[in-house]
Amino acid sequence: MNILLYDFLNSYIQHDLIYFLQKMGHKCNNVNYHKEVDKYNDDAFFERMEKDLKEGSYDLVLTTNFWPIVAKVCKKHDLKYISWFFDSPPNLPTAECMEFSCNTIFFFARADYETYKKMGLDNVHYLPLAVNTERLRSVKTDYAKYGAEISFVGKLYESMLPAFMSHMTEYQRGYLDGVVKVQLQLYGGYIVDDVVTEEFAQSVRDRYLSLSETAVQLTKKEISWAVASYVTHLERMTLLSILSKKHQLKLYTFELTEDEKRMLPDVDFCGSVNYLTEMPQVFVASKINLCPVLKANRSGIPLRAMDIMGCGGFLLSSYQSELYEYFIDGEECVMYTSLEDAVEKAEFYLWNEDIRARIACAGYEKILTDFRYEDRIEELLKGC
């Protein structure tokens, strides 16, 4: 097939997806679109895509994550549009344009799939992510540079919640404080979307309007995201702080605020790493790779966890339902259900190298057999 692909945000899976599409005999024209895009209405992108379609003959368009503006052009040309989410939750305010008949939409997280399925969409499907073990295992590892007892690669997540709460009533602040405390202790369950109701969001909007006629009007989704990102921030900061007091811990992230640096004095801040060439070396050279899952990802196996195991690295992840479904906890990876549990398990596996190596090897073997790009691509293109 002749496939037109768009990469808007340097998608982590784009490189491997194209590699296997071509390996399986498909022709790919990958367009790296680095301009900022209005996902729903963007004249500049609309014109660019029209130009691309005129200059080539394509059987379908493929993107990672769903882009409504792409769907609009595909609908106009009666052209098949396939999208595969690697983010959870989807960063879309509504389901607008998803219902188009040209669309086939895949979610890597079952909870997201079920949410959109319940909306009445019959063109949505569930498809876990894949791993390019060929690439990961071919990267030569610099153990002297990347070796560590414990490593974490990822964001610490800044949240607008404290700023939002500063303008709320005492009751509203207390309510959200309670939600944060409960969600922090809850692994394998996500309550934020249920307890941050439309009624609560409206009460916040009313409060803001009482302070200023031009006040921002927060949606339920915006408040929920602020809470989820704040809980994730607290969990990650606490976990890193505790573990770094007793063990060598390397943190790979884009930047730290001055407050974060003060709160993590014992963490070795190493800056960011290149996804393709450096991150695999971190996973291989670290005795333990942490993966505290973003709270708003209600069920899906994060790409980070898959990459760790695909490198043959040892994964210590917060409990995640689909990770528990596909992998044997304690045999192919290790999951924790509280911060105390995470610290205890990190201690145990640091001192038991043989067990740690056996689990990492078993996790790699599971990735090798059950999370192949070839199988995922066959599913993506089924019926095309």
Image: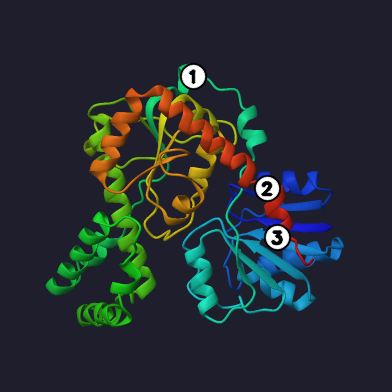
Mark 1 — residue? 143
Q: Splitting the image into 4 quarters, where does residue 222 fall?
A: bottom left
Q: Earlier in the sequence, mark 3 or mark 1?
A: 1
Q: Is the residue marked by circle 3 packed among few (<14), some (14-19), or many (20+) residues within 10 Å?
A: some
Which percent across, then down, holds residue 272? 46, 36
Q: Give the vertical position of 239 relative to 120 (above or below).
A: above
* Farthest residue, direction top: 144
What percent of the width, then of the height, locates residue 83? Answer: 65, 63
Please give the name of the residue rendered at 32% of the width and 25% of the height, measured from the top-left corner. Answer: 248
Assess disc 1: are there few (<14), some (14-19) or many (≥20) residues with their C-alpha within 10 Å of its C-alpha.
few
What residue is pinned by disc 3? 380
- Residue at 52% in and 35% down: 362
CA gap, disc 3 and disc 1? 37 Å
Sequence-first tag of 3 and 2: 2
Q: Nearer the viewer, residue 9 or 327?
A: 327
Q: Which residue is disc 2 drawn over?
A: 373
Mark 3 or 1, closer to the camera = 3
- Can see residue 267? no
Which secondary structure lies at badge 3?
Answer: helix
